[in-house]
Amino acid sequence: MPDQSDLAFISAVDALAEFSASRLSPVELMEAVLGVEDTDGALTQVYAEEAMEAARAAEQAWFNGSARALEGLPIAVKEDKGVTGKPTSAGSQVFADSIADADAPPVAAMRAAGGIFHARTNVPDMGSAGITGSLRYPPTKNPYNPTFNSLGSSGGAAAALAKGLTTLANASDYCGSIRLPAAACGVVGFKPSRGRNAVGAYFNLDWYDHDGAIARSVADCALLQNAIAGQQPVDLFSRDDWTPVTANPADTTSLRVAVSIDLGFAAVDSEVAAATLKLPSRLEAAGAEVNEVEIGWGDEVLQAYRDHAAMIMGAWMQPYLESSRDLLTPYAIACAESVYDVTPADFVRSMEVETEMWNELAPIMGAHDVLICPTTGVPSVPLDFDPAGPDIEIDGRSVAADYGWMLTYPFNMLSALPVLNIPSGTAGSGVPIGAQLVGRPFDDHSLFSVGALVEQLSPTIGTFAR
């Protein structure tokens, strides 16, 4: 059995092996996880008694041979994903009294696989920003440097993993909400190709929205991803023809890697750029073919994202401007008000831009197995950062505070492309840096193999935030 002091950080894959061999009990693991102090504001709710009861039942399941894929593993669930009978505020004072009457699709899948929901994780107001914190809950501190934010919207999930507050966590991603906090907290985050995982109504009709997995390793991420994949009746576009992904490292002798630091338009800090370039350098040294590529995307990409998000997210939030404006954060108000600046023609143009983006990227992806680029333009932003505030500066360039420092949202726009965030280094501030591995359309399997290889060739980023 692992040393008790390290038990809260045991990998999910190793925990299952220990359960199976009767060297570790789900009860012991749950006690260890619940015993970790949340000093960063990662969690919003904890269900200790229920979790311990479920852990005892999981212990019996392993004893009598009825254990399921995630049996007995502690899983923290985002505050904006419904858990039957539990408060689900989406981080907003507007929904402070909301109780979920059903499990959200990923929650239903994780429950069916035997996962134990012991806690909920912090999110921004209505999930509408790339940071974590709202009027309802204080911002989640970066576990490596508390003067920085954990990013978002799955910031509580990423911070909880880094601190040993959970073994696995679910996450969701509309403009980078899995990958941004995974990068800032030194963990692995996966945005699947659209349709692999069921998404809750009505955002399941919006191709930008994805439910995915976040974990401390590629293998753990694959484990959780396989448990939540598949068709559910609530999502018309969820697929039933998926097969499990594996964390078997790719063969470098046939691997073709494309590299872009700025995707053609993004401002990127020098520390982030240097950390990102280390990954393809290691792959090339191991025998892979690596090519720096020019992607001719421009500022129209961000404008197209804004116009689409305004017509969907902004329009959804707009009614609360009249009924509950005093309960909203400035950044949520800005998101809701964005709908007033967009026309139907702008929305159509945003789809034209997506087509142009893919026309530019398709030949590159056709000639390569994976594209590597930064996840963020800066490692993180200050703890109390306001996405509705003034522009910030990166590498001498002024960029918008809301989305200008992200390199994630283009791959929500091109939603068939799976993306894996992998730790790539550490900034001078102590905050981890992440890189995106972008796969070919619907090729989630190859992406996990490349991710496992990159992880194998890369040193561990710190020892997590112990």
Image (cartoon, grey):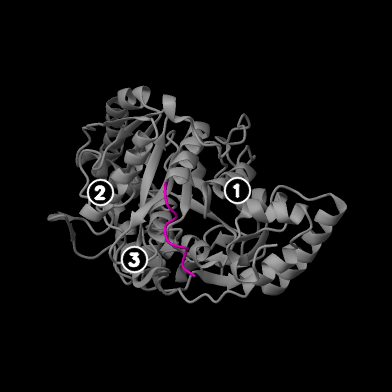
Say if 117 sits above or below 200 in the image: below
**Pointers 3 and 2 in contact (C-beta within 8 Å):** no
- Find residue 20 and report its horizontal and vertical position in percent: 77, 52
Distance from Cα at disc 1 to Cα at disc 2: 30 Å
> Of tags 1 and 2, which is closer to the observer?
2
- Find residue 216 and report its horizontal and vertical position in percent: 52, 55
* Viewer-side residue, 219 vs 325: 219
Distance from Cα at disc 3 to Cα at disc 2: 16 Å
Q: Residue at x 12, y 56 (%)?
A: 396
Query: Residue 460's quadrant in the figure?
Result: bottom left
Secondary structure mostly taken by the magenta-highlighted segment of the chain: loop
Is residue 114 visible in the rendered image? The answer is no
- Find residue 139 and report its horizontal and vertical position in percent: 40, 71
Say if 464 sits above or below 108 in the image: below
Task: Say which residue label 2 marks.
Answer: 273
Q: Going from the N terminus, do you reach mark 3 or mark 2 first?
A: 2
- Residue 341 belongs to magenta span: no
Label 3: which secondary element: loop
Type of amino acid at the residue the image marks with label 2? Ala
Task: Point out which mark residue 224 bears.
Answer: 1
Label 1: which secondary element: helix
Type of amino acid at the residue the image marks with label 1? Leu
Task: Say which residue label 3 marks.
Answer: 430
Q: Circle 1: is it few (<14), some (14-19), or many (20+) Cα within 10 Å?
A: many
Q: Going from the N terminus, do you reach mark 1 or mark 3 first?
A: 1
Q: Residue at x 43, y 30 (%)?
A: 252
Task: Pick the quarter of the image with the N terminus.
Answer: bottom right
Q: Circle 3: is it few (<14), some (14-19), or many (20+) Cα within 10 Å?
A: some
Extent of the magenta region: 458-466
Label 2: which secondary element: helix
- Find residue 5 and report its horizontal and vertical position in percent: 60, 71
